């Protein structure tokens, strides 16, 4: 099993592109939720999201293009022939335009509808940058980008690839906003309050991140300087409910244990957990249970935060963005806070780093994600 290192990344949130934007927003504990401007939110219960400002709104391809360029520049590597693995549900703008035109009795232009397919994005990116194969889209919702990173690390660790380009992308759109609003999952008070008493739900956010993964041997041959490492990964299913997590977080705990086993890392070595932390009534207690299952008595003191409290939930992109946030946290020696916290919830007895970032030297961190359908994923990341 070969060591997997991260040699570059590009990241985008509603705060903008790059790690410095994360420092000014996520690490400052400054939520970026505003009233939605890309569409009229008046028909919906919730009105807010974490949108990157700009008119017109960016496309997934545009955002990915810059993240890939930033990641390659940091890595000092063109990654020619590398596999491309992206978490995405596709960019449905052309799809929506087609059906809106049809509903209005106009001539519906269908030539661009194929670009809405999720698989088009990795193919377009790979063709543009000269990457290789496989070119895969991971569409399993909120664990998609985490799965992409895990699969990329697996390809490298088993010797099937020397370098991989992986990550995910999601932009706030009305179709998904409407679905989550209909399911009463969105916070009607315009704030995401993970692990807090009085939390109302999640809010969507723009996000994308792309990581260049390499074997340590390949990076050393290039004299590249790693910015971190992917030490372990784990995937597990709850088999409990179509949309609700297991109340004791059994699937998430199983994914975390698998990641720790693969990494050869003890729970005592984990200095920070970037939690899934959606701010919903069911997810946060289930995740807190999972942490107790994994960490035992230490679950009450290991530093945990949910950065969705500032970025919003970036769905298929969330695992990649949060992996980058975790790498930045270890590099800077600063743990991002959980914003929006109101009051401790007895169902979530964890140290969620409320309000203010915390200085800490961390060599190993755990990043957790969960999705509808009982899918769970975990990464163990190492500092450079």
Image (tube, rainbow, N blue to C red):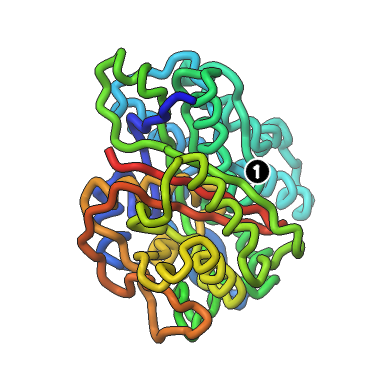
Q: Does residue 89 lie above or below 67 as drawn?
A: below
Percent position of residue 160, x then y: 55, 18
Which residue shows up at 35% across the image and 48% down it?
A: 364
Q: Quadrant of residue 75?
A: top left
User: Which residue is more in the foreground, 84 or 241?
Assistant: 241
Percent position of residue 351, x then y: 37, 72
Which residue shows up at 59% across the image and 58% down it?
A: 252
Which residue shows up at 59% across the image and 42% down it?
A: 88
Percent position of residue 66, x then y: 38, 34
Left or right, 287 with reference to 340: right
User: Which residue is more in the foreground, 220 or 258?
Assistant: 258
Q: Does residue 170 lie above or below 112 as drawn?
A: below
Q: Is residue 171 visible?
A: yes
State the SS at label 1: loop
Q: Residues within 10 Å of mark 1 (few under 14, many from 20)?
A: many
Question: Which quadrant, please, contains the C terminus?
Answer: top left
Q: Quadrant of residue 300?
A: bottom left
Percent position of residue 224, x then y: 27, 22
Q: Which residue is mark 1?
A: 139
Which residue shows up at 41% across the image and 23% down it?
A: 215
Left or right, 148 with reference to 163: right
Q: Is residue 25 visible?
A: no
What is the count of numbered marks?
Answer: 1
């Amino acid at each position: 099993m070969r060591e997997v290192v991260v040699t570059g990344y590009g990241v985008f949130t509603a705060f903008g592109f790059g790690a410095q934007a994360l420092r000014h927003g996520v690490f400052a504990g400054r939520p970026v939720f505003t009233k939605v401007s890309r569409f009229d939110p008046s028909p919906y219960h919730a009105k807010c999201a974490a949108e990157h400002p700009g008119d017109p709104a960016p496309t997934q391809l545009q955002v990915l293009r810059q993240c890939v360029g930033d990641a390659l520049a940091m890595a000092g590597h063109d990654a020619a022939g590398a596999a491309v693995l992206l978490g995405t549900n596709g960019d449905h703008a052309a799809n929506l335009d087609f059906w809106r035109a049809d509903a209005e009795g106009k001539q519906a232009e269908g030539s661009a509808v194929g670009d809405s397919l999720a698989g088009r994005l990795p193919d377009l990116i790979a063709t543009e940058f000269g990457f290789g194969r496989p070119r895969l889209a991971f569409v399993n919702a909120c664990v998609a980008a985490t799965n992409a990173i895990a699969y990329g690390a697996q390809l490298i660790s088993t010797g099937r690839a020397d370098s991989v380009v992986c990550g995910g992308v999601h932009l706030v759109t009305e179709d998904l906003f409407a679905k989550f609003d209909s399911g009463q999952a969105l916070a009607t008070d315009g704030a995401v309050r993970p692990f807090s008493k009085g939390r109302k739900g999640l809010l969507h956010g723009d996000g994308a991140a792309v990581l260049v993964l390499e074997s340590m041997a390949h990076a050393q041959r290039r004299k590249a300087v790693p910015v971190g490492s992917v030490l372990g990964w784990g995937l597990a299913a709850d088999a409990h409910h179509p949309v609700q997590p297991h109340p004791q977080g059994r699937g998430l705990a199983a994914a975390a244990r698998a990641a720790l086993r693969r990494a050869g890392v003890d729970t005592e070595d984990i200095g920070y957990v970037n939690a899934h932390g959606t701010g919903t009534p069911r997810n946060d207690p289930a995740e807190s249970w999972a942490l107790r299952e994994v960490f035992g008595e230490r679950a009450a003191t290991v530093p945990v935060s949910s950065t969705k409290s500032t970025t919003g939930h970036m769905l298929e992109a969330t695992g990649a963005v949060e992996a980058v946030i975790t790498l930045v946290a270890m590099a800077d020696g600063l743990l991002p806070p959980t914003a929006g916290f109101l009051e401790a919830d007895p169902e979530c007895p964890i140290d969620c780093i409320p309000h203010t970032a915390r200085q800490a030297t961390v060599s190993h961190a755990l990043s957790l994600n969960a999705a509808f359908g009982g899918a769970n994923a975990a990464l163990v990341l190492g500092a450079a």
